[in-house]
Image (cartoon, rainbow, N blue to C red):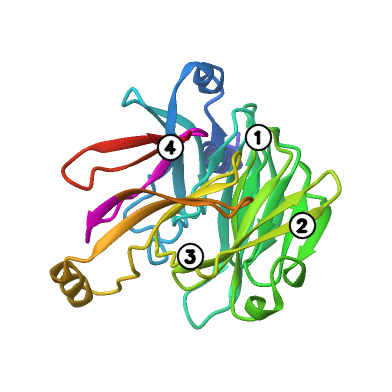
Amino acid sequence: MKKNGFAPILIILSIAILGVVGYFIYKNSVNQNMWPALKDVDITSISVKDISAPDCKTNKEDYIDCLAEVHINGKNGKEYLLLTTDNVVTDSRTPVFTGKFVYLIKRIGNSVYPSNDWTDELWKYNDRGQSTKLFSVQGLTFVPSTNDKLIAVTSGSDKISFIDGLGNVVKESPLNQLGDSRIIEQSEIGLDSWTSDDSTFWGDLWMGPAKLEFFTIMPSDWSVKKYNLSGLNIGTEVALNPNKGIIAFSDYPAIFDSDSLARFQASKKTVTLYLYDLKTGIKTSIATSQTKQFEQKWVDENTIGYDNPNGSGKLEYILK
């Protein structure tokens, strides 16, 4: 009786197929048990960790071309694994967790200069492991509303698109509607924040290290309001309070090298931290330092925190 020579081959093929399927599931897996528990976690940030093999190619640390874990970081010092996937962008465009969904950008294609054969894709993940590609464009940035009904997306160059949870474009706002004609030719579009009730979206126009203007878009009627920043002497430190329409900014200058920093520190110049109401035009000085940054950040809609100009630690200023 002849032995079946195909049996060992079939077994090997089955094991290989199972291995490939298992790897694909692992590299696109969601930690379903973790999501409900996060409702009681005071979240401080979200981060991405490269867990790929050492020889897995990366592109100038801008994205991970193999496996990455997306973690939530809590104020209690703990990390919580949300999901594992591939090609996650790891520059300043970090993933966003709204409580219901994780939004992240994947870099697809070859972006190593001089190749231009690449794109950035916006993906949405839910707690059941389901994922949806929502949008794609080179240089993509995004800000989802807190209720997940709209996501503002842009490449920075010509328009803002507002898409729904399925990726359908609901509205496009071109650059020439967002800023004055004097500045739109030399500026890029920045995405800032939604108000807490999602009634208004805030964005800005910027050039180099400087913000030139803030603007609002209201989805109820898609009206646009513009707030020009000329004459304020805004440096590189700006923090927007979207609910109040107030910015906290300093006149700390843009510094690009160690020699410039040394000269500025030797100058002993005064740096001032201001509050500026974009709607009323009222500017208030709240602190000064000697050549020191404030690294201000809104603690809540009524409180701005900033570095102590005369020592270590943080100080707070409460709106009156």
Q: Which residue shows up at 50% across the image and 83% down it?
A: 114
What are the residue bounds of the magenta stretch?
Answer: 288-303
Mark toward the start of the polypeptide (4 vs 1): 4
Q: Which residue shows up at 69% across the image and 51% down it?
A: 152
Taking the view exactly as shown, the residue that stands out farthest to the left is: 266
Quadrant where the N terminus is found in the figure: top right
Q: Looking at numbered disc 4 in the image, what kind of residue is underneath it?
A: Ser
Q: CA distance from mark 2 to mark 1?
A: 20 Å
Mark on residue 146?
Answer: 1
Q: Is residue 175 above or below residue 98?
A: below
Few, some or many C-alpha atoms within 10 Å of disc 1 (few <14, some 14-19, many ≥20)? some
Q: CA distance from mark 2 to mark 3?
A: 22 Å
Residue that carries the numbered disc 4 in the rendered image: 45
Mark toward the start of the polypeptide (3 vs 4): 4
Residue 164 in picture, x, y percent from top left: 78, 44
Residue that carries the numbered disc 2 in the rendered image: 224
Q: Is residue 17 above or below residue 107?
A: above
Please say whether residue 140 is visible from this viewpoint.
no
Residue that carries the numbered disc 3 in the rendered image: 232
Q: Nearer the viewer, mark 2 or mark 3?
A: 3
From the viewer's perspective, is 47 left or right of 207? left
Q: Looking at numbered disc 3 in the image, what kind of residue is underneath it?
A: Leu
Q: CA distance from mark 4 to mark 1?
A: 16 Å
Residue 279 in picture, x, y percent from top left: 64, 51
Mark on residue 137?
Answer: none
Q: Looking at numbered disc 1 in the image, what kind of residue is underneath it?
A: Thr
Few, some or many C-alpha atoms within 10 Å of disc 3 (few <14, some 14-19, many ≥20)? some
